[in-house]
Image (cartoon, rainbow, N blue to C red):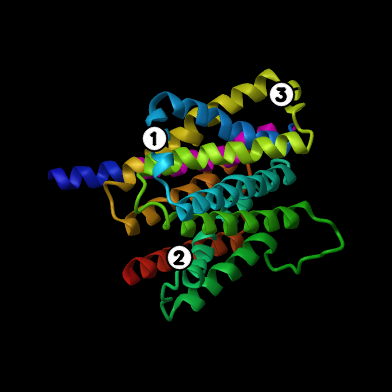
Amino acid sequence: MTKSGKTLVLGSLAICISASLWGLDGILLTPQLYNLDIVFVVFILHALPFLLMNFFLHKEYKQAGRLSAREIVYLILIALTGGALGTMAIVKALFLVEFKDLSIVVLLQKLQPVFAIALAAVLLREKLNRNFVFWASMAIIAGYFLTFGFNLPDFNTGSKTMIAAGYSLIAAFCFGAATVLGKGVLHNLSFQAATFYRYGLTTLIMLIMLVTTGSLNGFAMATPTNWLIIVIISLTVGSGAIFLYYFGLKKVTAMLAAICELCFPLSAIVFDYLFHGKVLSPVQWVSVGLMLLAIIRLSMQQRTAQ
């Protein structure tokens, strides 16, 4: 194998591993923090990785004075959408399903590219491929059948799965917005600096929420098991997986990275079956296939348009 081929394989493997770690988190780790306040959970899952980053990224503070007003605003919005609101929404969704239909919540969150591409067209005036509406509609329709099957949603039952699906879509929108906003800062900042500031600003935002909502009792309520899960997330699916992802991203094309990221929802299905015995119905499997196909086509079209 040539050197370029080895680099491609190494980069792809790094992204696949990081995406699988995110799938493991959504199915096995974060749901085990359900006894804690959501604001506290999101705060501690950003604060601890940020503290760890300070040991080897503390030099990034020097760049703060060189940031433009626009870049500062973008970083704050990225922390607010992708860090605070998006994470709270997906954690809320995982808590609501009470270890049931976890793979559905994680899969719906992968509609993120649909929102990202649409927002890029609105905010950044990027041109949409003429087939965007078709594939975006296909992804959304598949997401509906993934959640409800052939049944109509019953708004009178208070179904937690339906509410969780709503929160998952909010998370997808927030993460998609963060992706678009990130394009406004990454041309001047390294990925290490962008990640460092995102975690730092999210920690600050969540600290303000922690104090104003009276959620400080989370420190006292957290059990030894909770703290173990928090540390595992912080070292693996938190900062660890993110840096592993960017390591791989430097070695492969964006289109290949988008395909490798599909290890995230696919691993969620596998982990949900292995740990909880959850099996998707035939119509849900078809929906999964259609949604992933639509996301691949959207990612490829967006790559071609750039």
Can you name the residue that lies furthest to the top here?
Answer: 224
With 246 as the anchor, is 75 left or right in this view?
right
Quadrant in which residue 88 is drawn: top right
CA distance for labels 1 and 3: 32 Å
* Range shown magenta: 14-35
Question: Could you tell me how many numbered marks the image carries?
Answer: 3
The answer to which of marks 2 and 1 sits earlier in the sequence is: 1
Is residue 11 in view from this perspective? yes
Q: Residue at x 28, y 51 (%)?
A: 252
Tag 1: amino acid: Lys
Q: Residue at x 58, y 50 (%)?
A: 106
Q: Residue at x 84, y 56 (%)?
A: 158
CA distance for labels 3 and 2: 43 Å
Q: Residues within 10 Å of mark 1 (few under 14, many from 20)?
A: few
Q: Which residue is mark 3?
A: 219
Q: Is 180 located above or below residue 102 in the figure?
A: below
Where is residue 160? Give x, y as percent: 77, 52
Tag 3 near tag 2, CB within 8 Å: no
Tag 2: amino acid: Leu
CA distance for labels 2 and 1: 43 Å
With 115 as the anchor, is 14 left or right in this view?
left
